[in-house]
Amino acid sequence: MSQQRIDVVQDFRKPVEEVFAFLADHNNLKKVFGIPVKRIRDGQGDVNGVGSTRSMGFAPLAVEETVVGLVANQSIDYKITRGGGPLRNHHGRLTFSKTPGGSRVQWTITFESPLPLVGPVVKTVLKQGLGFGLRKIA
């Protein structure tokens, strides 16, 4: 299995707190991904915090992603906890930082696929879609 890595960086003319609040809310992610996204389980202490789970996509192919780490206004970590087809060990991390003009988000995704061509194809599609989605909300 070969590991794939995606890094997308987007600058915003908004403060970190505003960008973090928007991207931490599962229900806002439809604007980024262009597919249905819905919080299906609240987190511990915060509806979008650690333990919160979102469903992404169309049934029966929808995947569930669960927040496994969160530091307010700094980072969000999540992983696929249900579905994902041929993807294994999918982990995403959003890192937020201040810039002179506002803020920056670095979105990193790593995953593996046992099928030789699937990993590179998924990597290309995810990177282009994520970059496009983040530019839409910038």
Image (tube, helix red, strand yellow):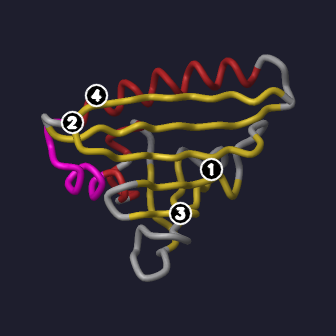
Q: Is residue 97 above or below residue 75?
A: above
Name the secondary structure under disc 1: strand
In three-dimensional space, the C-alpha distance between marks 2 and 1, rounded to whole angstroms, equals 28 Å
Q: Which mark is residue 135?
A: 4
Residue beneath the point at 37% across and 45% down: 30
Name the secondary structure under disc 4: helix
Residue 25 located within the stretch drawn in magenta: no
Q: Is residue 91 above or below residue 26?
A: above
In this orientation, which residue lies closer to the viewer: 66 or 68? 68
Residue 19 horizontal/vertical position (percent): 25, 49
Kind of residue at disc 3 = Gly
Mostly what secondary structure, the magenta segment?
helix
Q: Which residue is mark 2?
A: 12
N-term mark: 4 or 2: 2
Q: Is residue 121 above or below residue 51?
A: above
Residue beneath the point at 40% across and 57% down: 26
Q: Which residue is mark 3?
A: 69
N-term mark: 2 or 1: 2
Kind of residue at disc 4 = Arg
Span highlighted in magenta in the image: 12-22
Q: Nearer the viewer, mark 3 or mark 4?
A: 3
In three-dimensional space, the C-alpha distance between marks 3 and 2, rounded to whole angstroms, equals 23 Å
Kind of residue at disc 1 = Val
N-term mark: 3 or 1: 1
Q: Residue furthest bottom?
A: 45
Name the secondary structure under disc 3: strand
Name the secondary structure under disc 2: strand
In three-dimensional space, the C-alpha distance between marks 4 and 2, rounded to whole angstroms, equals 9 Å
Q: Which mark is residue 63?
A: 1
In three-dimensional space, the C-alpha distance between marks 3 and 4, rounded to whole angstroms, equals 25 Å
